[in-house]
């Protein structure tokens, strides 16, 4: 699921998107900070998304390959 969300955000023109290599297990193994506090999400403006056509393939593109 994370990979799909990464691709979807990239497709929507977001550049600052990353996946955590190794997941939470690797995060904890490296003694990185975690919390149980519930925080308010940061509001973001998704109204100005611009479709990134360079990472999309049409049916014809797939048929050609």
Image: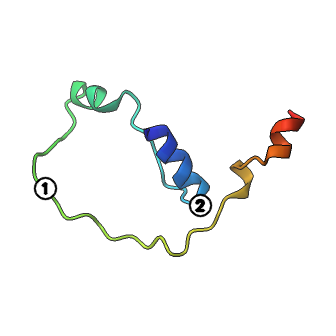
- Residue 52, percent from left and from top: 67, 58
Crowding at label 2, few (<14), some or many (≥20) Cα neighbours within 10 Å?
Answer: some
Query: Would you identify the image quadrant in which residue 48 lies?
Result: bottom right
> Which residue is the site of mark 2?
13
SS at circle 1 = loop
- Residue 61, percent from left and from top: 84, 43
Q: Are marks 1 and 2 in contact (CB under 8 Å)?
A: no
Exactly how many numbered labels are in the figure? 2
Specify the farthest residue to the left: 37
Query: Would you identify the image quadrant in which residue 42 lies?
Result: bottom left
Residue at image point 30% right, 26% down: 26
Residue at image point 47% right, 70% down: 46
- Residue 28, percent from left and from top: 22, 29
| Mark 1 and mark 2: Cα distance apart in space | 29 Å
Left or right of 33, for residue 43? right
Quarter occupied by the C terminus: top right
Crowding at label 1, few (<14), some or many (≥20) Cα neighbours within 10 Å?
Answer: few
Of residue 36 and residue 34, the one placed in the foreground of this image is: 36
Q: Is 22 drawn above or below residue 49 in the view shown? A: above
Q: Is 6 drawn above or below residue 14 in the view shown? A: above
Residue at image point 73% right, 53% down: 54
Residue at image point 10% right, 52% down: 37
**Labels 1 and 2: the sequence-earlier one:** 2
Q: Which mark is residue 38?
A: 1
SS at circle 2 = loop
């Amino acid at each position: 699921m994370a990979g799909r969300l990464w691709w979807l955000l990239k497709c929507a023109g977001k550049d600052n998107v990353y996946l955590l290599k190794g997941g939470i297990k690797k995060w904890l193994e490296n003694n990185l900070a975690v919390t149980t506090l519930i925080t308010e999400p940061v509001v973001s403006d998704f109204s100005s998304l611009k479709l990134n056509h360079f990472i999309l393939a049409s049916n014809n593109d797939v048929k050609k390959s």
